[in-house]
Amino acid sequence: MHCSGHRQCYLFIFHLVLFTTLALAIWWVFGYMGGLSVASPSTLSHLINWHLLLMLLAFVWFFSNAVIMYRVYSCDLATQHKLHIALQTIALLCIFAAVICMEVWKIMNSELPVVLRNTEISSSHFYSFHSWCGAMTIIAFVAQYVVLVVPGLRAAYADLCIWLIVFTFVIATATLITGIEDVAWWRYDEGLLDYKHYSTESFVINIMTVLLLGVLFLVALAWFRAPYSATDRADYQDVGVSDNTHTTRPMKGEFI
């Protein structure tokens, strides 16, 4: 893929923010929350760590790269589309795996003896703002994915899919931040996190959430710096249908 100097600078900053966010999440999980092992009943709560990392991978890495695919790279339109679908498919698999991890933990935690049961994180569903945001995120993601992969729907509802992608990324960011804060405050209530005295863990959490807002800003910059034109929309509708999908084209509007 060929990119101009300004776009290469944008992509460097974009991926630096992504890598830093994921690195902080891994540091938090392994440095403070016990890692990913679920070998015994006492470590079942580590399924929450799997849930966190899988959701971050899905939205911070795979979906964010899918979202900017059409806006940043000047390459073959058919190649863009294939990469866009591949990244979204991997994100979808990560989302399903993350949901399964959380559901397995809720079921297995409720079946443990009371002495081993984690009573601080509820086994109920849809009681928090985070869970409501999560449900909306999954519904929006699946809806735009279905429109994306079905050619007839893509041609008929290109505008809807474009705005569903934007909405999904915004609500996904809210879901990630509220989820991280839910875990942080649970750890504070348990006496595991010293939030009020500027502990290293509190800085890791706060920097990670600020970086998530940074990812949202960078994605928004790519999308709205050069608004979609009628030609963009036609390209999006006709990918995989037109005989001229292998033409290398510059991005409309010169985003950056």
Image: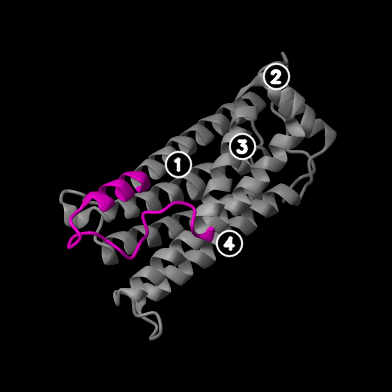
User: In front: mark 3 or mark 4?
Assistant: 4
Disc 2 and disc 4: Cα gap in Å? 35 Å
Q: Is residue 23 above or below residue 162?
A: below
How many C-alpha atoms fall within 10 Å of the one at disc 1: few (<14), some, or many (≥20)? many
Q: Which of marks 3 and 4 is nearer the N terminus?
A: 3
Q: Can you say whether 89 is above or below 95 in the image?
A: above
Q: Tell me the distance, in whole angstroms, between the alpha carbons under discs 1 and 4.
A: 22 Å
Q: Are marks 3 and 4 in contact (CB under 8 Å)?
A: no
State the residue position of label 2. Answer: 152
Q: What residue type is labelled 3?
A: His
Badge 2 density bin: few <14, some 14–19, many ≥20, Cα 10 Å: some
Contact between labelled residues 1 and 3, with CB atoms less than 8 Å apart = no
Residue span colored magenta: 102-129
Which marked residue is nearer to the observer: mark 3 or mark 1? 1
Percent position of residue 130, x then y: 51, 58
In the rendered structure, which amino acid carries the disc numbered 1? Ile
Q: Residue 214 carries which label?
A: 4
Taking the spot 69% from the left edge, 54% from the top edge, the residue there is: 221
Residue linked to disc 1: 95
Q: Quadrant of the N terminus?
A: top right
Which label was assigned to residue 251? none
Q: Mark 3 points at which residue?
A: 2
Q: How far apart are marks 3 and 2 (CA)?
A: 30 Å
Distance from the alpha carbon under mark 1 to that under mark 2: 25 Å
In this picture, residue 255 sits left or right of residue 58: right
Mark 4: few/some/many CA within 10 Å (<14, 14-19, 20+): some
The residue mark sitting in front, 3 or 2, is 2
Circle 3: is it few (<14), some (14-19), or many (20+) Cα within 10 Å?
Answer: few
Q: Which of 130 and 98 is in front in this view?
A: 130
Asked if the residue under mark 2 is in contact with the one under mark 3, i.e. CB atoms within 8 Å, the reply is no
Q: Is the magenta stretch mostly helix, strand or loop?
A: loop
